[in-house]
Amino acid sequence: MVLKTEEMTLNMGPQHPSTHGVLRLELQLDGEFIVDVIPHIGYLHRCFEKHAEFMTYPQVVPYTDRMDYLASMYNEFGYAVAVEKLLGIEVPERVEFIRVIMGELQRIASHLVALGTYGADIGAVTPFLFCFRDREKILSLFEMASGARLLYNYIWVGGVSRDLPPDFLRLAKEFVDYFRPKIKELNDLLSFNKIFIERTANIGILPLDVAVNYGITGPMLRASGMKWDLRKDDPYSVYNKFDFDIPVGDGRMGTVGDSWDRYYVRIIEMEESLKIVEQALNQIPEGDVLSAIPKRIKPPVGQVYGRVENPRGELGYFIVSDGTVNPKRIKVRPPSFVNLAVIGELCKGHMIADVISVLGSIDIVLGEIDR
Amino acid sequence: MIYEFLSNITGSEILGAIISAFLPLFLFILPFALIAVLLERKVSAHMQDRLGPMRVGYHGILQTVADILKLIQKEDITADANDKTLFNLAPILVFAGSYAVFAAIPFSSSYLGSNINLGLFFIIGISGIVVAGILMAGWASNNKYTLLGAMRSAAQLISYEIPTIMIVVTILMVTGTLNLKEITELQSGYFWNWLIFGGNVTGIAKYLLIPFMIVGFVIIYISTLAEVNRTPFDIPEAESELVSGYHTEYSGMKFAMFFLAEYANMFAVSAIVVLLFFGGYHSPFGYLGNTFGITWLIPIEQLLWFTFKGVGFVLVQMWLRWTLPRLRVDQLMAVCWKYLIPIAFVNLLIVGLITLL
């Protein structure tokens, strides 16, 4: 007798503990093995791009915060870079330094969430809480500077909303000294844990050619072995003044481009960000941060594409101006959205538990994917 | 013996036996489960640089009481598509299966639910009922996540019973009895008589036994971790994959039954490890009761020693849970079939040869 077997469809999400928000994954299963993964998005759509057409240029800034809510500072940073490119204005050097400090602290905070939740997805809850404990310190610094802990509205077009508070530089230096040993702690607890390596090495291998074809950017692309970072390759702000390395995946525990590489690239990136923050804190010049903020932003007719290296990859703003105070169109190139597209390729042939492992290593933020 | 005492009071042997079998449940395990839940939350909190429950009572000591009160008041949801009979029966079966284990466990020389000759056999058999309960829960919930959780759980529990039983058989060869009280009495005296140090075997055989007993202890401890679904083997209820496994669809008191059963199980397997390897209720040094000539003090001391050892292993379980990530389901099976079972089997053969000496 031949037993009839069929594939099972399993809906993972939108209410599921580890889809990192409201993502729905439609899994085609053969037993516990994945045949296909289809991501369904749009549960968090808030019409950011349409909204932006009815705002003046400065009014868009708080909305950019709400896209990638784990890297709000960097969204503002990217928007400011794009609009300044459109306007053709120079900002004071102190402003650029403040932006770099904030941006890199934000990168550390964002990576801490990514690494911590990744650990929690694999089943290690303690590293998750350790990461959040350290992230808390960065959020306190941001709160000091901007008054908010998640959605800052700090980096404005042409400047920052207010100068750094008097104690900020000292506390930021203290944080840098505090945080260095914590990376080692995370390595001891999670990165080199045998079980963790078993779960992540050789899982979800992303070959470089596939990564390039899909337009993957950020730590995911670097984990696949390509040294591509907009901070070095298309420098914006004052990044060319600092000395830092771009980590790439080397397949230390398995194959180049596996989940462990994606995880570990982020760990090294945190160290490099600390380096940048330290240098920036030592070199920051005095000056006025508000002088370059235009009274009325009315760019000439034209279009511009401004891009920055967000913690998740290339964040681009394509802005079309029709010469009025409102942008005609703002199109965002979200890194998470592009990175998520490859999940079907990564999961095929693995087990259900590996979907979680792969999804966590992509590090998505649904606020940005759905906008 | 409590059983004789109760039989005399009630005037009926059956009534005495029933009451004495239920006593550990109400006197020990229910309060223990309440305390263990709180302990877990506090231990995990302090491991993770936080405070844990702080609001209900001093440092949150009444938190679990409040939680249970909340669970009792909650609506007991049964979805339309559920298989009602199995859905209602499953928590009872799991609860009964894991609590029945305590009927045969000697807490002290005079406090023992039921002195069964096949005590060890009874424990292994009765805890097998839990698998049926879990499968029923997963199937009756009519949910793919619970079904996957239940399947994994059944596969895991059955696989890990094999190394457990092999180690139990090695113990059997050394002690020659399945009666848990007799096994414990064989380990009386100082800690040198515990089975992990070869028990009361004499001569060169004792020293030969020690390394293999330690191997046996490690194997049985790992497999009991898997049997109570604790990290790194908490795959059936892997919250990041299967929401919470086979009991996802349960709410209110039925959920509480699964929850309490889990914590009771933690102590049950620790108790088995203590009984088989660490002298059961025996003190490692001797008794204050003997020193001062107060005989009624000895059983109380024994109960304290037993609780102390058992809770010690429960704490190790918690420590592991909050340190390690989780294995994948195929890796879990590989650990069992590729490593634990062959090692346990070789261990069994060698211990057999040594006992023949």
Image (cartoon, coloured by chain):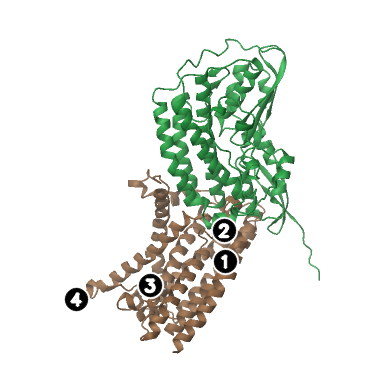
| Mark 4 on the same chain as mark 2 | yes
**Disc marking residue B178:** none
Pointer 1 chain: B
Q: Label 4: chain?
A: B
The amino acid type found where label 3 is placed reads Phe
Mark 2, secondary structure of its residue: loop
Sequence-wise, the earlier of marks 4 and 2 is 4
* Residue for badge 4: B293
Q: Amino acid at mark 4?
A: Gly
Drawn side of residue A74 relative to residue B99, left or right: right
Q: Residues within 10 Å of mark 1 (few under 14, many from 20)?
A: some
Q: Is residue B143 left or right of residue B5?
A: right
Q: Residue B213 falls in which quadrant of the image? A: bottom left
Residue under label 1: B335
Helix, strand or loop under label 1? helix
Q: Label 2 crowding class (10 Å Cα cut-off): few <14, some 14-19, many 20+?
A: many
User: Does label 1 or label 4 sit earlier along the sequence?
Assistant: 4
Q: Earlier in the sequence, mark 4 or mark 3?
A: 3
For the image, the number of numbered tags is 4
Q: Is residue B264 left or right of residue B138?
A: left
Image chain in green: A
Q: Is residue A322 above or below residue B338?
A: above
Circle 3 SS class: loop
Query: Which hue is chain B drawn in?
Result: brown
- Residue B278: mark in rendering: 3
Which three-letter amino acid code belongs to the residue tagged 1? Val
- The span from disc 3 to disc 2 (Cα, nearest Å) is 29 Å
